[in-house]
Amino acid sequence: MSLHGQYDPQNIFALILRGDAPCYKIYEDDQVLAFLDIFPQSTGHVLVIPKASRARNILEVEPTVLSAMMSAVQYLTRIIVDELQPDGVQIAQFNGAVAGQTVYHIHMHIIPRWEGLHAGEHGRGKAEAEELRALQARLVERIRKA
Ligand code: 5GP
């Protein structure tokens, strides 16, 4: 599975969407779900995925879905910046294995960055559950107050 191929309904994000796998949910609306990356490249690494689309990547995604994803990315980036006060934020999206894609349900990465702190390797190093739970609580509370 890489740049071209069939959507696999057993991919981990499809399982999360169906409630068959857990996630640290931060936000959801009728079009998108956002949750913490459990192998974060930095504190507060959030993934935004469309709920209904079966697009694997940028080539396949419906423009209206992409638009909803990007609106959510902007909203959540503002929330993350307010709560975590990073010095910068990377927004990333990968298409095909050679470009770094490992999950074939389109998603956007929001990766807060701090001066002097290198981002971790992509998709490596699982975060502690307690740390993820605490972060989830902070971001959910920040959204509640927004
Ligand atoms: P990609 O490499 O496809 O751009 O991004 C996939 C992302 O999903 C990676 O950053 C990886 O850490 C994350 N990821 C992989 N498996 C899981 C999982 O089970 N739960 C969560 N929350 N993130 C995952």
Image (spheres, helix red, strand yellow):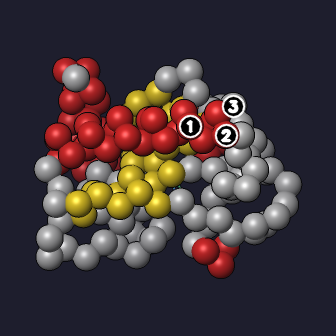
Look at mark 1 in the image and give the residue it sits on: 67
Locate the C terminus by quadrant: top left
Residue positioned 67% across, 73% down in the render: 97
Q: From the top left corner, tell me how far across and down residue 78 is, in percent.
A: 27, 40
Question: Whole-Å distance between the Cαs marked 2 and 3?
Answer: 13 Å
Look at mark 3 in the image and give the residue it sits on: 52
Few, some or many residues within 10 Å of mark 1 (<14, 14–19, 20+): few
Question: Whole-Å distance between the Cαs marked 3 and 1?
Answer: 14 Å
Is 100 positioned to the left or the right of 61 in the image?
left
Classify 2 as above or below 81: below
Sequence-wise first label, 3 or 1: 3
Disc 1 residue: CB within 8 Å of ligand 1: no
Mark 2 or 3: the one toward you: 2
Three-letter code for the amino acid on which mark 2 is drawn:
Pro
Residue 63, numbered circle: 2
Residue 27, numbered circle: none
Sequence-wise first label, 2 or 3: 3
Is 127 positioned to the left or the right of 33 in the image?
left
Marks 2,1: beta carbons within 8 A: yes
